[in-house]
Amino acid sequence: MPQWMIVILLSLTSMVLAAEESSDGCLKRVFGHYCLGGSMAQLLQQRPAKMDPIVNGDRSGIIYTKGRERIYVMAYQGRIYKVLQTYEPSSQVTLQRLQRTLGKKYGNPQDMSHLPNYVRNMAGKIGAVRRGEGELRYRWQLPGSPWRVELGWTRKLGISLAYLVNGLDQQQREADESSL
């Protein structure tokens, strides 16, 4: 097959994939496979998991493993509202590498960290996180974007990077609060 035909076929394929994403409600493809705003059922058809989805009312979730790292995909009313990946090792080097990469792509984050008042430096922050006394959390929200990015470090998950659909995340939070 001539090289120019391959280029045309690849171009057409990418246009079809982009059209499928937008018609499926896909706002952003993250970590190569997961479509924010897309259908959880369609994801499970395309990427079967080794486990059954965890279902709690209108919420569902699935966990994919990638070595020691995990990817959590969460949906509300069948639409994916959050995709979170954990990173190993949980260290200052890993956190700073992710911060630099995200900063180059999205600019400066909003610091949403919760830490004890006595913490003064990064070593103290990391110690507080490891003891479960606080968390590091950074948020990137581009103006006018329907999704956001959050980088966090908690005792439970370690270092994680999450992409969230703002509207669906808000709806599932309100539904959770109204069920109390």
Image: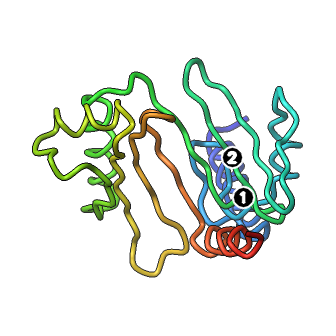
How far across and down, in percent of the image, does residue 110 sit?
A: 29, 64
* Of residues 100 and 70, the one drawn nearer to the viewer in this rendering: 70
Image height of 70 relative to 31, above or below: above
Residue drawn at 14 percent across, 47 percent down: 118
Tell whether 62 sits left or right of 154: right
On-image quarter of the C terminus: bottom right
Q: Secondary structure at mark 1?
A: strand
Q: Earlier in the sequence, mark 1 or mark 2?
A: 2
Image height of 172 relative to 52, above or below: below
How far across and down, in percent of the image, does residue 14 sit?
A: 67, 54
Name the amino acid, label 1. Ile
Q: Secondary structure at mark 2?
A: strand
Name the amino acid, label 2. Val
**What residue is shown with label 1?**
80
Whether residues under marks 1 and 2 lie with C-beta atoms below 8 angstroms apart, the answer is yes
Quarter of the rendering containing residue 28: bottom right
Residue lying furthest top? 67
Label number found at residue 73: 2
How far across and down, in percent of the image, does residue 151 sit?
A: 40, 49
Residue drawn at 67 percent across, 75 percent down: 174
Image height of 160 relative to 70, above or below: below
Residue drawn at 89 percent across, 43 percent down: 45
On-image quarter of the N terminus: top right
**Mark 2 residue crowding within 10 angstroms, few (<14) / some (14–19) / many (20+):** many
State the CA–CA distance, disc 1 to disc 2.
7 Å
* Of residues 86 and 59, the one drawn nearer to the viewer in this rendering: 59
